Image (cartoon, rainbow, N blue to C red):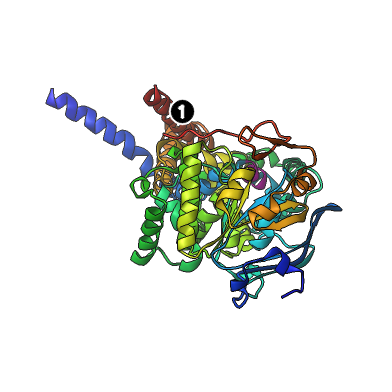
Amino acid sequence: MIVVMMGNMTTIINFLIEPLQYEFMQRGMIAAVLVGIVCAVVGTFVVLRGMAFFGDALAHTILPGIALGYLVSGGARNELFWWALGTAIVASLGIGAISKNSQIKEDTAIGIIFAGMFALGIALISTVRSYAVDLSHFLFGDVLSVSMQSLWLILLFGGIVLFVIFAFYKEFTTLSFDPILAATLRLPVDLLNNLLLVLIAVTVAVSLQTVGVALMVAMLVTPAATAYLLTNRLPRMMFLAAIFASLSGIIGLYLSFYLSIASGAAIVLTATLFFVLAFTFKRLKGL
Amino acid sequence: MSRYGIDLMYPHTHHETNQPILDVAGLAVRYNGMNALESITFHLHEGERIAVVGPNGAGKSTLFKVVAGVLQPSSGEVKIYGSRPNKHVCIGYIPQRAQVDWKFPVSVADAVMMGRSAKLGPFNWPHKKDWEFVHHALETVEMSDLATRQIGQLSGGQQQRMFIARALAQEAELMLMDEPLTGLDMPAQEGILNLLDRLKEEKVTVMVATHDLEQAASHFDRIMLLNHRIVAFGVPQSVMQTNNLMKAYGGRLRSTDDGSMLAVDDRCDDGEHDHNH
């Protein structure tokens, strides 16, 4: 009996350890966890402020920037981060300005721009012969090809995002709950709103290799929404969201390894499964 | 002080020597060519309780937002203790309850602490002193036992009192309350009105937008009858005259059984009703 259990244990341990023998898996795991934490914390505000569509649009809008970088650098992956970062920041502030001063309805304006920019990105990439493979990496992520240099960039910029959220935690919270209160308290409302947009933009750039532009919104909203179902305190929501996102990254990569499915899709599917479980759990508890 | 004919509107002469907490002169707000407010001139003194009464769309919320310094007027001036409102943090704006997301994941104490965000400044986290402010504010509104509740679990009256506690934690000296009594049942309304008495003791100046003319007459020092312009402003008995009310409301007035006047709104429902426990 004990021997059988020991045997099972060894199997499980082997099962868990085997993928980690590969360096690309180690780097991928670390990247997925880091990106998960950053997305979860920023995503908390995205969920509470109802900015899911903005996040999705922003991620798609940066594709022409990445495409341009890809054409200019002749396919060098490491430089794409900077192109993504620059485009994301410009796009986030641009979309923010449009939402404020739009003649037509805000979501319509965002929809027009994001689809147009996305199409431009696809058009640019399609001028290169190997475009199908590269495009799919930009769209759905390719976390297993994360280089050591990319990992450092994720750590650095992810760390900056978390630090800024921590430093302005109460300002962001007050602004998200009651913008008029924030204004009467003479908080720099416009500055804080733009700062949050920039933070979302940096998060998008940091997450690019992990989930790609098409699945980005899932990392921003799914873990945070899962946490939202389970707690009614903001710090706990951030913490739980980070846990769910990290677990999704790790479990997703094991799934990707053993079932040979695309890594970004596996991570997002795991995060979605967590959401469904939390939703069901809450429903059952409510009955 | 006869500049704007204020002495006619303001009979309490013993305040003359004080600096007015709020001084509004020739204020106008235009939206898309329409006048939301025009030629608004009045001033308030410390500790006054003002009811702002008028039909829907009369500009009550707009007036409050301009006074709070959240909205810029098209012309005219607002002065709080002699200077523009946009630097003051002593103005508490108490929103209509439907304006915030009650599922926001914070406790009552957290929400009240938000009132102290400005006093704390960036990078700072609440100190012991700030929590004392919060707890004292919750005591004043009699909600100490609800401090750890999720805000979504509060009744309508408690939500309103939580906002007042938040303004107290902000150390607001002028509180602007946008229809705090709307949708509340009688006991909850009484609770808010009693709280207004307590605020007067603490020298807080209060402007309350309300629909209830009778409550305005019985619980407030002065009434401002508003319909884009100030129709009348003064002590209740001088304002609550049929010709004034007709001017503000047109035909939308009817008298109640006890002889008092009630403004009839053209909107079907005032929103959600109170679910007091």
Residue B51 position (above or below residue B271): below
Tell me if residue A148 can be seen.
no
| Rendering quarter of residue A273 | top left
- Residue B88: image location, x then y, percent: 59, 69
Residue B47 position (above or below residue A105): below
* B120 and B131: which is toward the camera: B131
Q: Quadrant of the C terminus of chain A?
A: top left
Query: Amino acid under label 1?
Result: Val
| Rendering quarter of residue A197 | bottom right
Element on which disc 1 rests: helix
Residue B76 position (above or below residue A194): below
Residue A8 position (above or below residue A72): above
* A129 and B17: which is toward the camera: B17
| Most common SS among magenta residues | helix
* Residue A250 covered by magenta stretch: no
- Residue B109: image location, x then y, percent: 40, 52
For image coordinates 60% across by 69% down, the residue present is B21
Give the mark count.
Answer: 1
Residue marked by disc 1:
A276
User: Magenta segment, which residues?
Assistant: A53-58
Left or right position of A54 against A47: right
For image coordinates 75% across by 74% down, the residue present is B2
Left or right position of B209 against B188: right
The chain containing the residue under callout 1 comes to: A
